[in-house]
Image (cartoon, rainbow, N blue to C red):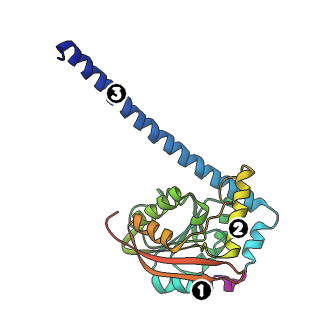
Amino acid sequence: MITISQSKNNNYAMRGFAARIGKSREERMKVETCKSKERVGRYEKEWHLEASRKGIVKATIGAPESFFYPEIAIMKKFLREPLLDAGCGYGRVLKHFKNITGVDISSEMLGEAKKTGKKVFKCSITDLHIFPDKTFNGVICNKVLFHLTDEDFLKSLREFHRLLRKDGRIFFGVPYIFNLRNFIFNLRGILHLFRGSVGITRTRSYTKRKIISMVKKANFSPVYFDILDYYNRTSGIVVVAEKVGVS
């Protein structure tokens, strides 16, 4: 038989437990926010290191223009302006469109991108708060997302979803896992991890199933999906997906 005193004690205990659980959740949210900011800081640091390495910007700019032609053609076929180039780098895509804005986390890359004459801003693609909802008809994020964790990959896609107008579309490209050269790049990323380096030097390759899953989780519907082979014997998955649902 439970006495009134025991009942009160149980109620107090339950309230205390609920308070601890609530506090724990709040603390976990703070921790996750800090971790997210820390990852963004690491990405920025890694980009700075990459851009500061001998000839890194010049080497990137020096890639054959034909390297990007197939992707540019797909972008022009499926996307409508105004566009956002998320992770615009030195501006290789910006110069192919009239009404386009670029963002990147690297000051060095943005310095080059400004030479295209387009508007560019420094920010992380995981947090594009500088733009209001439904600003663009299309978002391009080419050869960027594979440097992120799965969590930040999905967070970026959801940010793109927020920024897109009705029936807006995204274009992005990531390495295809069933390619020897891509496999070697992945090993290089693992070696960087052992050396304590975290960020963009780590690359990831993906299966078709994984990419489709990520796209659907972010409330997009695939419109175009293909595997492209590049001049340097790598291959990549290219995706065009349309916004579904509400922001």
Left or right, 231 with respect to 165, comes to: right
The image shows residue 176, relative to residue 152, as above or below, that is below
**Label 2 CA crowd tier, 10 Å (few <14, some 14–19, many 20+):** some
Along the line of sight, which residue is nearer the eye, 3 or 168?
3
The residue identified by callout 1 is 70
Left or right, 90 with respect to 73, comes to: right
Q: CA distance from mark 1 to mark 2?
A: 22 Å
Marks 1,3: beta carbons within 8 A: no
**Label 1 CA crowd tier, 10 Å (few <14, some 14–19, many 20+):** few
Amino acid of disc 1: Pro
Give coordinates of residue 67: x percent, y percent: 67, 83
* Image quadrant in which the C terminus is located: bottom left
The image shows residue 102, relative to residue 106, as above or below, that is below
Give coordinates of residue 82: x percent, y percent: 46, 75
Q: Which mark is residue 17?
A: 3
Foreground mark, 1 or 2, reads 2
Q: Residue furthest front?
A: 1
The residue identified by callout 2 is 185
Along the line of sight, which residue is nearer the eye, 124 or 195?
195
The image shows residue 96, relative to residue 159, as above or below, that is below
Give coordinates of residue 178: x percent, y percent: 62, 75
| Dot placed on the residue nearer the N-terminal end, 2 or 3 | 3
Amino acid of disc 3: Phe
Q: Which residues are magenta?
A: 64-68
Residue under the point 40% across and 32% down: 23
Amino acid of disc 2: Phe
Residue 126 visible to an observer of this rendering: no
| Dot placed on the residue nearer the N-terminal end, 1 or 2 | 1
| Dot placed on the residue nearer the N-terminal end, 1 or 3 | 3
